[in-house]
Image: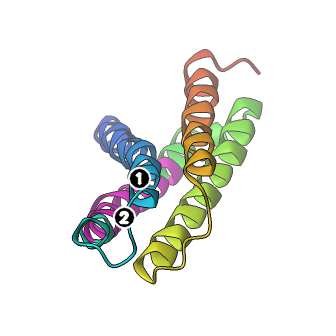
């Protein structure tokens, strides 16, 4: 069963990261649109669907499968796992910010610039790189 849960975990992580990398790009393009325009309304639908139908379920499955793997594999006693868990908590916090910004765009309350979202777009990538290194290399 462990290997099946691991496969599910990897699939969920890939889905979560795909959404976490794409959503800020939508924010960048959404910033360019005029409030109330057809294009702005289309971005609202795209952002909401991406968050609710892909990113949120993928994060939940990632967490549930990951916790099962940590428990079953006794990884919770390893230093690399503690570092990974910390980074996944940070990534989950970023997810929370993204959720908030989807709501802000939906209510036409965005106050952030394209440049801000371009920079934020790199945060999930950097976190992902360190998480993958910790899992594969297990440096400590």
Residue at image x 56%, y 50%?
117
Q: Tell me which corner region of the image, top left, top right, bottom left or bottom right, holds residue 2.
A: top left
Q: Tell me which corner region of the image, top left, top right, bottom left or bottom right, holds residue 127.
A: top right
Of residues 56 and 62, the one nearer the viewer is 56
Residue 5 higher or lower than 101, as above or below: above
- The residue under label 1 is 23
Please provide percent x and percent y for residue 67: 53, 53
Residue 94 higher or lower than 73, as above or below: below
Q: Tell me which corner region of the image, top left, top right, bottom left or bottom right, holds residue 52.
A: bottom left
Residue 44 higher or lower than 9, as above or below: below
Please provide percent x and percent y for residue 93: 64, 60
Q: For numbered disc 2, what is the local secondary structure?
A: helix
Circle 1 Cα neighbour tier, 10 Å, few/some/many (<14 / 14–19 / ≥20) = many
Q: Main secondary structure of the magenta part?
A: helix
User: Which quarter shows the C terminus?
Assistant: top right
Residue at image x 27%, y 63%?
46
Q: Residue at the bottom extreme?
A: 107
> Can residue 11 be found in the magenta stretch?
no
Colouring convention used in this rendered image of the protein: rainbow
> Can residue 59 be found in the magenta stretch?
yes
Discs 1, 2 touching: Cβ within 8 Å: yes
Q: Earlier in the sequence, mark 1 or mark 2?
A: 1
Please provide percent x and percent y for residue 103: 47, 77
Q: For numbered disc 1, what is the local secondary structure?
A: helix
- The residue under label 2 is 51
Please provide percent x and percent y for residue 13: 40, 42
Magenta-highlighted residues: 45-67
Q: Tell me the distance, in whole angstroms, between the alpha carbons under discs 1 and 2.
A: 8 Å
Circle 2 Cα neighbour tier, 10 Å, few/some/many (<14 / 14–19 / ≥20) = many
Of residues 128 and 73, the one nearer the viewer is 128
Residue at image x 61%, y 15%?
137
Of residues 26 and 66, the one nearer the viewer is 26
């Amino acid at each position: 069963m462990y290997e099946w849960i691991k496969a599910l975990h990897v699939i969920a992580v890939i889905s979560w990261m795909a959404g976490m990398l794409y959503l800020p790009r939508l924010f960048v393009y959404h910033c360019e649109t005029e409030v109330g325009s057809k294009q702005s309304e289309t971005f609202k639908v795209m952002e909401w669907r991406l968050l609710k139908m892909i990113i949120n379920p993928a994060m939940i499955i990632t967490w549930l499968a990951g916790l099962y793997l940590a428990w079953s594999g006794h990884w919770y006693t390893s230093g690399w796992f503690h570092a990974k868990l910390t980074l996944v908590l940070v990534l989950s916090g970023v997810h929370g910010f993204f959720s908030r910004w989807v709501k802000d765009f939906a209510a036409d309350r965005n106050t952030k610039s394209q440049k801000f979202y371009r920079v934020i777009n790199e945060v999930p990538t950097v976190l992902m790189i360190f998480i993958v290194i910790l899992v594969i290399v297990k440096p400590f």
